Image (cartoon, coloured by chain):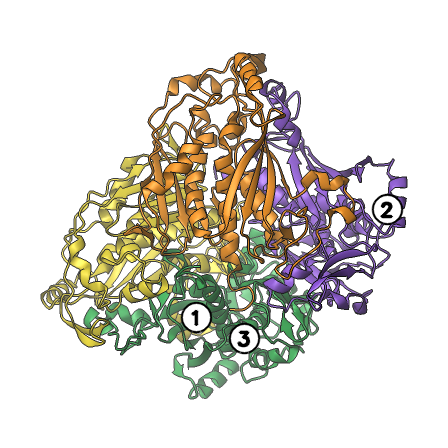
Chain colours: A yellow, B green, C orange, D purple
Amino acid sequence: MNTFGRKFRVSLFGESHGASVGVCVDGCPAGIGLQPSDFAADLQRRKSGARGATPRVEADAPELLSGVFEGKTTGAPIAIIFRNENTRSGDYSNLLSQPRPGHADFVAARKFGGYSDYRGGGHFSGRLTLSLVAAGVIAKKALGSVTVASTILEVGGVKYGEHEALLEEAIARGDSLGGLLECVASNMPVGWGEPFFDSAESLVSHIIFAIPSVRGVEFGSGFAAARQRGSEHNDPIVASSGKTKTNHAGGVNGGISNGNDLTLRVAVKPTSSISAAQQTFDFEKGRVDELHIRGRHDACIALRAPVVLEAATAIALADLMLLNVGSAGV
Amino acid sequence: MNTFGRKFRVSLFGESHGASVGVCVDGCPAGIGLQPSDFAADLQRRKSGARGATPRVEADAPELLSGVFEGKTTGAPIAIIFRNENTRSGDYSNLLSQPRPGHADFVAARKFGGYSDYRGGGHFSGRLTLSLVAAGVIAKKALGSVTVASTILEVGGVKYGEHEALLEEAIARGDSLGGLLECVASNMPVGWGEPFFDSAESLVSHIIFAIPSVRGVEFGSGFAAARQRGSEHNDPIVASSGKTKTNHAGGVNGGISNGNDLTLRVAVKPTSSISAAQQTFDFEKGRVDELHIRGRHDACIALRAPVVLEAATAIALADLMLLNVGSAGV
Amino acid sequence: MNTFGRKFRVSLFGESHGASVGVCVDGCPAGIGLQPSDFAADLQRRKSGARGATPRVEADAPELLSGVFEGKTTGAPIAIIFRNENTRSGDYSNLLSQPRPGHADFVAARKFGGYSDYRGGGHFSGRLTLSLVAAGVIAKKALGSVTVASTILEVGGVKYGEHEALLEEAIARGDSLGGLLECVASNMPVGWGEPFFDSAESLVSHIIFAIPSVRGVEFGSGFAAARQRGSEHNDPIVASSGKTKTNHAGGVNGGISNGNDLTLRVAVKPTSSISAAQQTFDFEKGRVDELHIRGRHDACIALRAPVVLEAATAIALADLMLLNVGSAGV
Amino acid sequence: MNTFGRKFRVSLFGESHGASVGVCVDGCPAGIGLQPSDFAADLQRRKSGARGATPRVEADAPELLSGVFEGKTTGAPIAIIFRNENTRSGDYSNLLSQPRPGHADFVAARKFGGYSDYRGGGHFSGRLTLSLVAAGVIAKKALGSVTVASTILEVGGVKYGEHEALLEEAIARGDSLGGLLECVASNMPVGWGEPFFDSAESLVSHIIFAIPSVRGVEFGSGFAAARQRGSEHNDPIVASSGKTKTNHAGGVNGGISNGNDLTLRVAVKPTSSISAAQQTFDFEKGRVDELHIRGRHDACIALRAPVVLEAATAIALADLMLLNVGSAGV
């Protein structure tokens, strides 16, 4: 459902065109410095504004409702909300009859008996990642010296930085592009990850696949490992700290962090909302018909995704950190 | 930890060289026909024996301890154990001083304060997948008309079926190979998957990354989506059932099954245990030294993995199925 | 932590003197009519104002932030907040040195390393029950024809209705009184409650003991059963519906509802905050000293507890209802 | 369902007349000494044999299947089974048509669509407490210096020790008696218990109400608190350790342990199976008819319950202990 984590527990709520989106973070250790300004940098990174990003502009000012006292976390749940202000409900009225390809319109209507809020994707909107980023800011603070950083590797198959022409072309055609991201957690200790079902990769992938538009997650050498030999893939340990010569394992063995960097890559699909005409089923007419999506959207959602990916990874790591406390004895 | 699922709940236990490995399945609906012979086919598929697979041979006869009465599930937990018989504990004594690259030896010892059972990888052994396969047999039955099938696409980067020479060469060199698998769930209904954190991909990837040796999971067009445009990636709906013309989404929109086949691919790393000499740290000597792994192992663990992948996928789908019951109203 | 329920999931947040208290209800079925006015009656019942209740007056107007669209639940999380307005932080400054007997002041400070919000009890304040009552309103709607009703049986050991003199005397002395409550759920179906650890009594008592001031919970004949014989305690079934002649079991057998009324009683301790002088430890002085509690408080918190008890019971029942769906087959 | 605990996690399985009952304990810290002989004392206390207890005699020898290596816990799940040997299936055939009052026969059949194992109560049998006691032995070891001890206070309303005549009379009449138990946990630290829904009382009562036959649970002064005044109920703190002069709170404030003994009392109903004739519904005849219960049963199940109550309490405390680790900072 809308909660992730067993000790560091994040619950999301909200809709694209409702009153607010928000998040509640339970289980955060007490005594961590936290104030509204701490959210500014990551929220800004997520914000639209860059070329290829939606022109919907929101203040995205976090309201801290609970869990912080005299500038520090108290151990009680931290609730944060963001008011939705810049909503145009009229834009989305045709989603009822003609669900958009790639979106949750059709499945949400069916799953919830026709009662889901369809405006702007409702609860399935990318706007919910605002809550995730806010929770990620808290998780990063809880992680202390462990740092999490994401970068864009490719846009539409082209190396990031060299992708401008491709992006302009996509925008001109009313089309969209996918992207490839990387995320690295540094200064990792040994021991995070629980046996079998709560492996580090299991928890990290669980939350990453909750980010809208993610199509694939790989750790270390990832899919390339399927083409390797053991003699090249195995990472020789070269120090008593567990440091390995290579890091094909992505910092995890047997589901447990081995003290090397946690490394992963994520495939982001091209934005589903495109201006160009598409064919899809019209439930009113009972036949396939042309669809024109109006409204505001990103030409390449991957461009705004790194901070979301960092947040998701940091949340999973914060949970793994707290789950590990006491494993070697009480 | 060692439990997966909120409604269809699977708990594993056991070690490679302990008394038994086993599994407890709680939350399975009552009235499903189940007897020991139902496990034979899938257990046989997982078994060693094929070229490139470990010569350790176990009877792998399931003992059903509970939860079945007069040949049908009762709604109570179903516990199954498999006795370990063919164990050679003497083979693994050097793991204490020189942990094997790619294995959990080092991290398990550190995480559990030196108390983990290191024989044959202990609780981190691939032998635990026996329990997963057994639970998968029950999940497949619970799924009714939804079927789950896995195939091997590649071995060591070569198309399956054309990989024999490569495998022989790897065996001759004492090396190992990775592999690429596909899994498809057919006859999927619309509506499985919960909003945000319990998306279908989240739960399925969570359990798949618990399978030892998995390095990557992708759904639908997966990593290729990062190089696509929206106009090619979007799947046009072509019927009121939700059927789409293409299936780049892999059968899931917004985390919820859309009625098309659920499709995914998994990268399996080359077996970490290889006969060829390796360099790695020797904690007794306090320096890197040559390591020779004795004992029995698979040259390509991916060859035995399809049935494990099916089991993991089926377990996640059974949980998603039961979680979805009642979503559109009680 | 601050979340209850596996399918109908309630998460609380907030502090007595922070910005807000609030609640997020996840897993509520879609299509249930819900609007702000639905909360008025139960919120009013919880409110102060009666003789013996605190004079702190709050508007307690619920802000529905998410999960409702066109007057109906959508299947997405329902977040509700209540602003704290009438707070007087100056009242509570001496809690740091001299924790109040019966309150969480001491344990919260110790558990959270001195970072807990101590103003008015902070997160441990009875004000959090406002969130519980709001979630209870939603749970009651989700329960459909199953109704939950609580009454006060006794105040300070005297039958409710005959307790006025006793209450006046306690107020005059700056003292407080405990109370005894009953709660009955009617129109119960057969089958709610899961085997062993998630018995109906387990889930219901779990949430009831989360209500501040509860000291005991009993079902059916409760503690009186310890003095009965089997021949008087056993409830003969008298109809094929499962209806029993007596209801010593309180509507539950083997942890599963049997179709008769669910009945339970709850002991509420006397309010811990009293105006009369008390002796307790002063951590600044390092010795026991006299304590004078200033501020506003209830002389008998049990008087406001029935609607809180109803809410808790309704939430547990809503979760049990949803957990039961599909038990007899998918 | 059949699992309790978030960090110290206990899963039960088995039926009265199936192959085995068993338990799997996950999350137990590594390095705790554990061998089969450690179970002997508590299993013996639970065993039948005393006057008023069922003559069914089982060896109850625990088979440790996993999670222990060289006499110490490894951090992996600990699975234990007990073979059922002394079963007489013929005794229970009439439960299908005439469900026993006070038992789960009727509700189990209805809940699980007629597929439940009805022999001897199946999964709802008191025999499942064998698994609970085994898990309790492990929990007690994990608790270290915190000790848990239960005693019988009353049998059939008569002080324990003075109850023999009453018991003999009940046996002679084919009737049964209830009982009152107390449980005390000593050497408790400050800080166990999580805010609101996972209060110490919530978790402890949750698992205690899972024990068959429990009708009520109260902490500290319990139901007597409903008749007290704040000035008598409040426990003055008398030392910087948090020690209180009295212990009406039962060692818990705001859901969190305060360093004083955790004290609770439990009401156990009279055994439902009685030899004396009863009236109840016969589903075959479609009318109320006389019921004669054959088979073996306890005249006062409370006599065997103390060790079960200790086990339940110890399991909840072990979970609370592990949940608390790290609360005041990572």
Observer-side mark, 2 or 1, equals 2
> Pointer 1 indicates a residue of which chain?
A
What subunit carries mark 3? B
Rounded to the nearest whole Å, what is the CA distance between mark 3 and mark 2?
49 Å
Q: Give above or below for A102 relative to D191.
A: below
Query: Circle 1 — which element?
Result: helix
Residue D286 occupies quadrant: bottom right
Residue placed most toward the observer, C71 or D23: C71
Task: Tell me which amino acid carries mark 2.
Answer: Ala
A304 displayed left or right of D161: left
Disc 3, SS: helix
Structural crowding at the residue carrying mark 3, measured as other residues with C-alpha within 10 Å and reported as few (<14), some (14–19) or many (≥20): some
Q: Which residue is mark 2?
A: D170
Direction left: furthest residue: A172
- Locate residue B316, reporting x and y percent: 47, 66
* Label 2 to label 1: alpha-carbon separation: 76 Å
Quarter of the image where one finds residue A109: bottom left
Question: Where is residue B210 shown, x and y percent of the image?
Answer: 49, 64
Q: Residues within 10 Å of mark 1 (few under 14, many from 20)?
A: some
Residue carrying label 1: A232
When asked about the image quadrant of residue B77, the answer is bottom right
- Looking at the picture, tell me which residue is in the foreground, C328 or A48: C328
Identify the amino acid type marked 3.
Answer: Lys
Label 3 sits on residue: B141
